[in-house]
Every structure is written in structure tokens, then in C-alpha cells.
Amino acid sequence: MERIRPAVSYVLVTAASALGLWAAFSLPHRAPAPPQRNVVIAKPQPVVEPQKPQQRPQVDVVFVLDTTGSMSSLLSGAKKKIWELARFIAQGQPAPDLRVGLVAYRDVGDEYVTKFFDLTDDIDGVYQNLTSFVAGGGGDTPEHVAKALHEAVYRSNWSNGKNALKLVYLVGDAPPHTDYQDGFDYRAIAKEAQRRGIRINTVRCGSDEDTRTNFTEIASLGGGDFSTIDQSGGMNDVRTPYDEELAKLNRALTDTAIPWGDADRRSSIRKKAETNLAAPAETQAARAGFFGLAATRGRAAAVSEGDLLDDVANNKVQLERVAPSALPEPMQAMNAEEKSRYIEGKRKAREEVLNQINSVAAKRDAYIKSSAAPAKSGFDGRVRETMKKQAADVGLMY
């Protein structure tokens, strides 16, 4: 055993030395630590989401109008006031987008029971359709109110979204039929309207008590307001010294339009323009004021739809992609440069006319304000008052 110990010691020392050499060459070497420096670590910056453009409030209004013989005066007044009402609605803050629909109604056995025109932002078209309404028929007291309401609530292409104000104005002088077995129930329709976020406001013309009872019930079930106006409509027919000048500017504005599309569409645009230019001076003045206001809010239009200048400016169409056959005749033979010059000339002319319109319209507004207060008891006054009240639901102020 004594001989073995030195040998074992030698082996252990040798093994330890070998292990040390292996570790020296095999293990990774750490580089010497660099000298300390003051290092500034940047704080992470918060991610800023790009702001989405604020969506404009949407106002959808469907007028449901009794067009039987006793409603002649109301219809005449509505035709004169439609542009004034459109301009009033457009004055909301923030600036809303407006669409209007129409339902005319009479009764079974008349020339028609209902006429339906869907919601549209083509107010020129709305005016044209409204002018086609002529009072006639009737004779017995009840009318087919329920079918008219059904058309307005179920057929209209209502906007979606929380910032959409959806209103029906039922205007008539007779109660609804309750004896027809055709499935149209005005109570069920009014309840469904409210469930869909559509308010039904009712306006009784005249003094029939059954109409008061039924129209009050419809407004209550439909989440709207009931009001009474004179049989004539009760609208102030205010004429001003500025109407004729604005009517001339309205014509000049229309002359800056460039109708485009197929032949039928261009013809339709021209017919709507002719209808508006045949209106009384005070109605044309209100129309000019409507487009003047629109220009201050980002849309310099001359007609409600189908205007090449407006559509190019709003990127709805690219000029170079419009087929020559879809252009008005003066432009069909033009080259690209000539087309651009033509459109630019129209744009400058329109800008000048719109500036003149806004200047004269301000004088007209001041004259009306100083000479006669709006008749709150008339049809247009009732529309204004309920609009102010109910628009607040979507953050729209008047």
C-alpha cells in the first residue's frame, strides 16, 4: 500500500493538470469588459393611430302625404317650401348628409292607393316628384293611411348607424281605415318603426276629431310628435326683393352643370333642371340658397346628381375613363386637353356664381327675419320644430 500512494498521487496531479489545460483551451474566453459609458435608452413612443375623418350625421326624412282632393292647398305649399326645408336641415351642426323620400296616398278605388319614391340625396329629383302630386279622389273620410305607413317604414332604404336620424312625417286630414282586411295594421307598423329607430311624426290638417285621435296614437306608438295645422297648411308665403336676382343666379348655376351618362340619364338630368327653372322665383331662390350653403360645406354642386364637374371633383369618376358617348355633345369631339380646359372654365364660372348666391342669400335671410317670423303653426314650422328637438338624439344641433 505504501508503494501505491505515490503512484496514485502522481496520477491525480497529472489528471488535474490535464483537466486545467483542457478547460483553458476549450471553454470560451470572455472579452474584457469595455469601459463604462453613459448610455441613454430611448423610451418607447406610444403608437398614434391615424384619426379617422368624422362621419357626418345622416338625416333621412320620408314625407307621407295625403293627396286626396281636400289637400290641394297643403300640397301647393309643400312644393314651395321643400327647398327651404332642405336648406334648413342642411344647416345643422355638424353638417349632415340629407336624403328625402316621398309617399303619396289616397284610398282603394281612387286612381292609386300609394305612390312610393325611395330615399335619395337627389333633391332636384325629389322636387320633380313632388310637383307631380296633384290633389284628387277621396270623398269618404277614411283613407288608406296604414298602407302608406307600411310603404314608408318597410320599403324605404333607411340608413344604418347610430348617427342616423330617421323621421317620417305623416300629413293628412282623414283617419286610417280600420275595416280593410288586407293585413295593413297601422298600430303594428308604428310599433315596428320605433323598434327600428324610425320616428313617426303626425300632422293633422284641419279639425277632424277622429283624425286627431288616430294620429295622436300613431305618433305615440311611433315615438314621434303629434301636431295640428290649418287645413291650408298654414305656411307663410314670404316674397322678398331678392327672389328674382337669386332666380337668375339659380339659372346661371344650372348652366354650369355638365350632365353625363347614357342618353336617358342626360335627358333625365335636363328634365329635372327644366322643372326647377319653371318654379316660382321664391322657390328658385331657396334652391339657389341650398346649393350655396352646400358650397360652404365642401360640395360645389349645380345639380343634385349626374354632374360631371361635381363627380370628377369628388373622385366619383376619372375624366379620361368617361366614354365620349357619355359626354354632352359639346365635349364629345374634344381631346383630353380641351376637355380639361372646358371643365376648368365651368368650375371657375360656378365658383363665381356660388359666391354671388351666398352674398344675395344672406340679404334675403336678413329680410325674411326682419319682416316676418316663421310660422311655427304651419307645416314647414312643425317640421322645423320637431327636427330641432329630435335631431339632438344623434348629436345634431340647430
Image (spheres, helix red, strand yellow):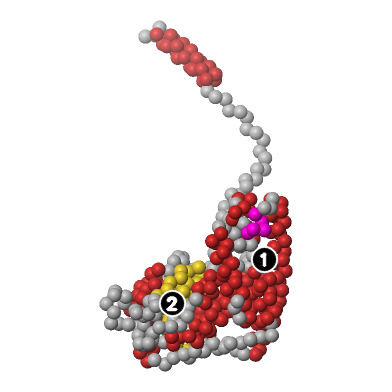
Seen at 60% across and 54% down, the residue is: 325
Amino acid marked by disc 1: Thr
| Residue drawn at 39 percent across, 76 percent down | 112
Residue 96 visible: no
Q: Within the image, what quadrant is residue 83 found in?
A: bottom right
Q: Main secondary structure of the magenta part?
A: helix
N-terminal label among 2 and 1: 2
**Image height check: is 149 above or below 348?**
below
Q: Secondary structure at mark 2?
A: strand
- Residue of label 1: 256
Magenta segment boundaries in residue numbering: 328-332
The amino acid beneath tag 2 is Ala
Separation (CA) of disc 2 from disc 1: 33 Å
Q: Say which residue label 2 marks.
A: 104
Residue 233: x and y, percent?
50, 87
Quarter assignment of residue 361: bottom right
At which x and y percent is residue 286? 61, 78
Q: Residues within 10 Å of mark 1 (few under 14, many from 20)?
A: many
Residue toward you, 279 or 33: 279
